[in-house]
Amino acid sequence: MYIENQWYLACLVEELSKKNPLHKKICGRELVLFKTNSGKISVLEDRCCHRNVRLSLGCIHNEHIQCGYHGWEYNQEGKCVNIPSLPSRERIPAGAKITSYHFEIKHRSVWVWIGNPELMDSTLIPPMHEMDNYPRVYNYHEVEADLQLVAESLFDAYHINHVHKHSIKTFMGNIYDEKIDFHLKKTDHSLEGSYLRKNDGSFFEKYYFGFSKMVETHFGFWFPNVSKLDIRFKNRHMVIYEHFYQIDEHKVMMCQITLWKNILDFFPPFARWFMLQKSIKIVREDLVFLADNKRIKSSTGKSDLLIKSDEVTFEFMQLWKRKIQQHEELVAQED
């Protein structure tokens, strides 16, 4: 069952060009996104109603998207407005139209509403304010995985020292055996918090990022598709967002977006290259454990065994369970 009646980040605005449409598949829906010559954006069903081929295989023609098979053109509302082979005296069939999806442009990103339009609520788009003006890089990863496990992976405080010991290393500080004081803030659809990690960086890392004994770390999760890890130094800032959704019944798409302020700003092209390479490596390290074929099912049927230090995981699982139950109840009412 797909998690509907939600906003999904379909793409970042820089992914769109005025030449080529962009294909996305979210919660089983085939979508095409395009930007017209005047800069207007549209999200349509990725299907030409003529022969049911993908519109994303076509091109953008002035203010319309044109099918690459027979040249049928559609406007931003999904209505066919031109059929090259249609005799001049004939009208375009009234049924020549496709689904148009509601969307919002926020945080330099295109958010598409998947579900019942009557339940659409723009306030449910997470407050990703760093996305508005920080430099950023992004990368996509498709994997067969459990959506809930993917959702938690970014802000799981205890996995960083182990999973990312070859990429992050000591950059984000370390957590040892002592009890961590997580300051949690819970709402109906989100979980946010902060804690401190010990600054075990090298001399050069401390010289650049600061010699403070602790690294201030913030995190967040907004059901069902956005997680955040927020690392704050004295004069520098780095934020990682992960956006994830089901492509179909088996695969999950994860988009990791890395943003920064006052880091390597002496040479922006190098900063972008460095951040992108580091981000890709970090995600690949996570995916080793998140892929379904790497997670062993209990022979006794027991669920995950949590301990006292898994406070954040417990609260996340409670939130996930509650929201999934609400979603299932809503689907049952609509049926």
Image (spheres, grey):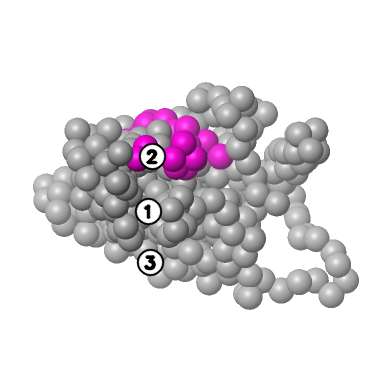
Q: Main secondary structure of the magenta part?
A: loop
Q: Quadrant of residue 236?
A: top left
Q: CA distance from mark 2 to mark 3?
A: 51 Å
Q: Residue at (74%, 50%) from the top-left corner?
A: 308
Disc 3 is placed on an element classified as helix
- Residue at the extreme left: 266
- Residue 277 x %, y %: 29, 63
User: What amino acid type should be assigned to the residue bearing mark 3?
Assistant: Lys
User: What amino acid type should be assigned to the residue bearing mark 2?
Assistant: Ile
Mark 3, residue position: 281
Q: CA distance from mark 1 to mark 3?
A: 34 Å
Disc 1 is placed on an element classified as helix
Q: Quadrant of residue 233?
A: top left
Q: Is residue 98 magenta?
A: yes
For residue 92, the mark is 2
For residue 55, the mark is 1
2 or 1: mark nearer the eye: 2
User: What amino acid type should be assigned to the residue bearing mark 1?
Assistant: Leu
- Residue 133 x %, y %: 27, 33
- Residue at the extreme front: 89
Q: What segment is highlighted magenta in the picture?
A: 90-114
- Residue 15 x %, y %: 29, 49
Badge 3 crowding class, 10 Å Cα cut-off, few under 14, some 14 to 19, many 20 or more, is some
